[in-house]
């Protein structure tokens, strides 16, 4: 690894970091279509589909819930993120810095980095369930929070070390490799569905309907798992990428779009990854449960290997790796915003270490649905702040980009919007028992309302004109 | 050469998706299907990286970069 290479990587990643994208650098729709299609067929898909089965969702609820939830997600990208990205053409971080101030963005970066570490950790664990097959590794079960064997810890730490080294050396190569693997991985998911259905005895449309409702998604949760309804599916499909759409992370990507409508191109990703792939991986898990009756084992690698052989197991390794790797790198970049003087490779190495340690705990995989919901929820209020600043500043009579215009490094309205929204959501969960999957929607409105009210008090428009 | 690589990749994808279909229709065994899919995977791995992502935004090949 050379410093030159690192500079090249960081330099490319930070392109137009503090300036709007010039017209010549805008990209056509095809780039976004391909990017979204590849990005949402990832290692997480091997876990989420099976967890829906384990949570006892009914077949009709799953299909209808995914159709509605994914449509809402596409509309969120298209109508909320896309227009702001195309108008401002700035990264999320810089846009947030102008509104919330440098110091608050540092805290945002810290939370973001931690969430990235845990997400990458879960993907390392998913890969380990495939890598461990030839070593006859004892796999984790649905109720496991702690590692079962020293062998698991060693496998995960070795994988974590390799993935971290690769993350330090070449983000671009891994990103390109992920793009190359994408068409093959999508076909593996489709193949999984076809083979799984055959193994479950599907031979006609009637038998497909019967087996889907009575065998695969029979509406009965596995032991120790809560029951999921259509509402869980709708809200999970809508909000599993909450950080990206209403949380505005994808401002950084969509600022390159020639048209504000390119946010709608996310349909390619969500309907391939969050519909086809989730259904396919659910079918795979159902086959596993039929063969291994009453098994509590939950190992995506072993599940894919059983039905698809070596191609299935390698797909799990690659999907997990290609998700973990850029995530570790992004976590490193987020932390570098807080510690700008520490070299990127050192930060990435530290992040890789935290990620590898986190990956030792199977709870990250078993509780992935809750974790994904929490991740989006924690970052969402800042997206709501950007939305409110963009649409309501003039109408409601407060200065837009308050921190920038008042030359402040810290915006109290933005901070309180973030903290009070999370307190509100925690209260809904703690006192009224509202599950984490449903907190994002009321939370978003609360964040917008708090920001508008406090901004009118702190940064009134009349004061700035005087 | 590039066309040959593309044909290899296309064949790799075919060997990934056709065996599951023939298995579904009852025309092949599970073990045979798994091996064929494995071969398809190898074919995709050894051909696709050499032609996908090999062009710059303006259509010029990567080799013109430096």
Image (tube, rainbow, N blue to C red):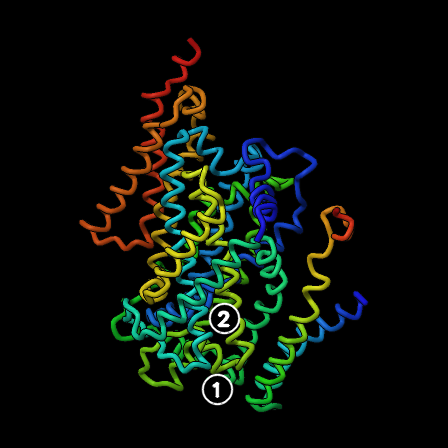
Q: In x, y percent, where is residue B51?
A: 73, 62
Q: Between residues B30 and A347, which one lies in front from this camera angle?
A: A347
SS label for mark 2: helix
Q: Quadrant of the C terminus of chain A?
A: top left
Please name the residue that numbered disc 2 is placed on.
A316
In the depicted structure, whether residue A25 falls above or below residue B1: above
Question: For the view shown, which residue lies furthest in the left direction?
Answer: A431
> Circles 1 and 2: CB distance less than 8 Å?
no
Res. B15 visible in picture? yes
User: How dense is the environment of label 2, judged by Cα within 10 Å: few (below 14), some, or many (20 and up)?
Assistant: many
Mark 1 on the same chain as mark 2: yes
Q: Based on the displayed image, in which of its 4 quarters is residue A159 positioned?
A: bottom left
Please name the residue that numbered disc 1 is placed on.
A201
Q: Based on the displayed image, in which of its 4 quarters is residue A217 positioned?
A: bottom left
Circle number at residue A56: none
Report the residue at 62% width, 65% height from top.
A183
In the depicted structure, whether residue A315 falls above or below residue A358: below
Report the residue at 71% width, 64% height from top.
B50
Res. A220 visible in picture? no
In the depicted structure, whether residue A224 falls above or below residue A78: below
User: What is the chain letter for disc 1?
Assistant: A
SS label for mark 1: loop
**How many numbered marks have been drawn onto this rendered protein structure?**
2
């Amino acid at each position: 690894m050379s410093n030159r290479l690192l500079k090249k990587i960081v330099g490319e990643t930070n392109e137009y970091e503090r300036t709007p994208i010039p017209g010549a650098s805008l990209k056509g729709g095809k780039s976004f279509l391909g990017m979204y299609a590849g990005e949402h067929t990832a290692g997480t898909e091997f876990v989420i589909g099976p967890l829906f089965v384990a949570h006892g969702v009914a077949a009709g609820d799953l299909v209808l819930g995914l159709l509605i939830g994914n449509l809402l997600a596409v509309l969120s990208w298209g109508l909320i993120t896309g227009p702001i990205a195309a108008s401002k053409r700035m990264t999320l971080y810089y846009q947030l810095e102008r509104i919330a101030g440098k110091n608050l963005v540092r805290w945002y970066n810290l939370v973001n980095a931690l969430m990235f570490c845990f997400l990458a950790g879960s993907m390392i664990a998913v890969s380990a369930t495939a890598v461990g097959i030839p070593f006859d590794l004892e796999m984790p079960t649905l109720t496991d929070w702690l590692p079962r064997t020293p062998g698991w810890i060693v496998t995960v730490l070795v994988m974590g070390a390799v993935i971290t080294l690769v993350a330090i050396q070449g983000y671009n190569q891994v990103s390109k490799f992920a793009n190359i693997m994408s068409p093959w991985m999508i076909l593996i998911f489709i193949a999984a569905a076809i083979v799984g259905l055959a193994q479950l005895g599907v031979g006609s449309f009637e038998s497909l309907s019967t087996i889907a409702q009575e065998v695969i998604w029979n509406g009965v949760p596995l032991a120790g798992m809560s029951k999921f309804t259509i509402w869980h599916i709708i809200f999970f499909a809508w909000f599993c990428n909450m950080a990206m759409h209403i949380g505005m992370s994808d401002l950084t990507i969509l600022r390159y779009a020639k048209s504000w409508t390119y946010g709608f191109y996310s349909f390619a990703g969500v309907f391939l990854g969050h519909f086809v792939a989730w259904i396919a991986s659910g079918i795979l898990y159902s086959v596993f449960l039929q063969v291994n009756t009453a098994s509590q084992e939950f190992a995506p690698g072993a599940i894919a290997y059983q039905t698809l052989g070596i191609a299935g197991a390698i797909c799990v390794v690659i999907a997990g790796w290609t998700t973990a790797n850029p995530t570790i790198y992004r976590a490193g970049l987020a932390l570098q915003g807080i510690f700008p003087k520490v070299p990127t490779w050192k930060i990435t190495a530290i992040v890789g270490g935290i990620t590898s340690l986190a990956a030792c705990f199977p709870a990250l995989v078993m509780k992935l649905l809750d974790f994904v919901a929490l991740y989006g929820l924690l970052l969402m209020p800042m997206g709501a702040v950007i939305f409110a600043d963009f649409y309501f500043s003039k109408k409601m009579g407060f200065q837009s980009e308050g921190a920038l215009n008042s030359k402040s490094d810290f915006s109290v309205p933005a901070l309180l919007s973030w903290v009070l929204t999370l307190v509100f959501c925690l209260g809904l969960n703690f006192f009224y028992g509202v599950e984490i999957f449903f907190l994002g929607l009321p939370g978003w409105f609360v964040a917008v309302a708090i920001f508008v009210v406090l901004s009118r008090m702190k940064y009134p428009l009349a004061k700035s004109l005087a | 050469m590039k066309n040959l690589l593309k044909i290899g990749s296309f064949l790799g994808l075919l060997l990934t998706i056709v065996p599951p279909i023939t298995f579904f229709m009852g025309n092949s065994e599970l073990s045979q299907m798994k091996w064929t899919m494995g071969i398809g995977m190898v074919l995709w791995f050894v051909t696709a990286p050499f032609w996908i992502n090999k062009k710059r935004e303006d259509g010029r090949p990567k080799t013109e970069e430096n």
